[in-house]
């Protein structure tokens, strides 16, 4: 199952092969919408700096570090599985690149609302209700002290859980408190919201729900759980 | 003006926001009045409020800020208190580490110790900047004095403070994004360099050095 979920993620990263690098796992995707598309919840200036400076910085530094260390990267999840053995520069920048790529994809203009279908049902079954899920996710995002991320993840057994990680770590890393595959992530580094929300991280978290691209989150959930269903058939 | 306020480490709860040692616009253009306003009135105040809330009704109500920080370090059940008490101190230390028209080459005891430990002020200033540049995530860069009297430059993450490491802090630079994002956005290095060159309060470092 773990191997299969890795494959799924690698496929996501390989879907549009880039000429920027020979490694298909390492490419800088274009932002799937305009800088101002998530206004007023996330302002255009923040989006532009976040994507073109912060994310781009992680990506460029990752490419540099991979070259300098002559690492062969078949996929970021494989790299994260041995995060404890990576140099800080690779761990931080690989995390930064992966986390931001996921973040852009799970947001969209005219989005928000509630997840439908199996994911919606599973969220209700796991957390009691969609509102309780949002409260717990908000708590994880608010109580992350310093820089980091809040996540909704799928565990190896297919169950859903909420967690948070420091700096640019993520739950795919072997150093994570609780490991799983993230399907929804919220950046709570101050650079993600400070220009618009300043010290009001809570306001930023509340606004985030208006731009969550639930069809994309569902797609990620389904591809992971389909694999965990298939796995026992092999016996 | 620019006299550092009473050291908050000996304060007893409930803790209060210590006075800012200059006007909110006094560090312009290096740090805008808007940044200072949010940073001092919102962030620093919130760390103090949260510390007070956590210790209310506990044995910590009779402890000084210093005792709280030192007794909660590395105690996972007190992580939140440690973070907020540490930030209560760190921010007081940061406000006093700066002054309008600061920077330059220190002449007092700190200046002499810098020459002994780093060879020259220039190599010290370079190392201070390079160390700040390497911090990943939220945290602080510090000039500290160790037990033998020699000086070092270190980074601490999040709310960590040199007080719990047996080191005497002399001067600090806040590298949390909230310290500079409104003014510099992703250009943290520009912020750190400007603070080093134009704001550091070496008289404050001398007080800490002698203490």
Image: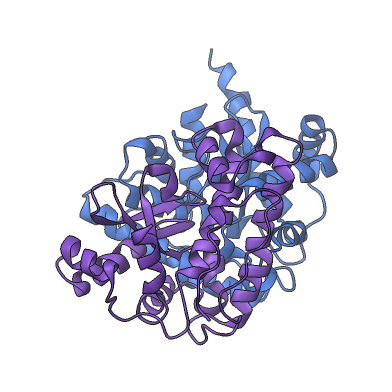
Chain colours: A blue, B purple
Q: Residue at x 62, y 34 (%)?
A: A154
| Whole-percent x, y for residue B162 in the image | 41, 49
Q: Residue at x 55, y 85 (%)?
A: B26
| Whole-percent x, y for residue A225 in the image | 64, 32
Q: Quadrant of residue A42?
A: bottom right
Q: Residue at x 52, y 65 (%)?
A: B177
| Whole-percent x, y for residue A131 in the image | 84, 44
Q: Residue at x 44, y 41 (%)?
A: A77
- Can the viewer see residue A33? no
- Is residue B67 depicted above or below B126 in this figure? above
Toward the top, the furthest residue is: A235
- Is residue A133 depicted above or below B100 in this figure? above
| Whole-percent x, y for residue B121 in the image | 21, 73
Q: Quadrant of residue B128?
A: bottom left
- Is residue B31 depicted above or below A164 in this figure? below
Q: Nearer the viewer, residue B86 or A51?
A: B86
The count of marks equals 0
Q: Nearer the viewer, residue A40 or A33?
A: A40
Q: Is residue B112 left or right of residue B178?
A: left
Q: Is residue A92 left or right of residue B28?
A: left
Q: Nearer the viewer, residue A162 or B143?
A: B143
Q: Give the quadrant of the C terminus of chain A.
A: top right
Q: Is residue A113 left or right of residue B172?
A: right
- Can the viewer see residue B203? yes
């Amino acid at each position: 199952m773990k191997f299969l979920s890795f494959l799924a993620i690698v496929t996501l990263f390989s879907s549009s092969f880039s000429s920027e690098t020979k490694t298909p796992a390492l490419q800088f995707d274009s932002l799937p919408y305009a800088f101002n598309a998530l206004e007023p919840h996330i302002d255009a200036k923040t989006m532009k700096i976040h994507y073109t400076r912060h994310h781009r910085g992680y990506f460029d530094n990752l490419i540099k570090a991979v070259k300098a260390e002559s690492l062969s990267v078949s996929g970021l999840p494989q790299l994260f599985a041995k995060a404890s053995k990576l140099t800080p520069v690779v761990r931080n920048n690989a995390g930064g690149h992966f986390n931001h790529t996921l973040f852009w994809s799970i947001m969209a203009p005219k989005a928000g609302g509630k997840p439908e279908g199996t994911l919606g049902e599973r969220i209700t079954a796991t957390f009691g209700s969609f509102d309780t899920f949002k409260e717990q996710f908000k708590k994880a995002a608010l109580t992350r002290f310093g820089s980091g991320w809040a996540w909704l993840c799928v565990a190896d057994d297919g169950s859903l859980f909420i967690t948070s990680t420091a700096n640019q770590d993520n739950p795919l890393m072997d150093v994570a408190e609780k490991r799983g595959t993230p399907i929804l992530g919220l950046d709570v580094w101050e650079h993600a919201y400070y220009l618009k929300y300043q010290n009001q991280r809570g306001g930023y978290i509340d606004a985030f729900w208006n731009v969550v691209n639930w069809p994309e989150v569902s797609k990620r959930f389904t591809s992971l759980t389909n694999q965990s269903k298939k796995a026992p058939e092999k016996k | 003006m620019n006299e550092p306020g009473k050291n908050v480490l000996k304060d007893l709860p409930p803790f209060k926001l210590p006075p800012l040692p200059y006007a909110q616009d006094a560090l312009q253009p290096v740090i805008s009045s808007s940044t200072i306003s949010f940073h001092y009135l919102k962030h620093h105040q919130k760390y103090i409020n949260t510390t007070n809330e956590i210790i209310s009704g506990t044995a910590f109500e009779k402890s000084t800020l210093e005792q709280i920080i030192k007794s909660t370090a590395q105690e996972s059940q007190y992580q939140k208190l440690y973070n907020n008490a540490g930030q209560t101190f760190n921010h007081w230390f940061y406000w006093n580490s700066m002054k309008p028209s600061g920077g330059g080459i220190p002449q007092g005891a700190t200046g002499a110790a810098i020459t002994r430990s780093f060879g020259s002020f220039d190599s010290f200033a370079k190392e201070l900047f390079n160390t700040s540049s390497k911090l990943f995530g939220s945290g602080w860069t510090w000039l500290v004095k160790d037990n033998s009297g020699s000086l070092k430059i270190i980074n601490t993450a999040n709310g960590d403070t040199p007080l719990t490491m047996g080191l005497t802090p002399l001067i600090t630079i806040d590298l949390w994004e909230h310290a500079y994002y409104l003014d510099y956005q992703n250009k943290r290095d520009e912020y750190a360099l400007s603070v080093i060159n134009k704001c550091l309060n070496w008289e404050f470092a001398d007080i800490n050095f002698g203490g």
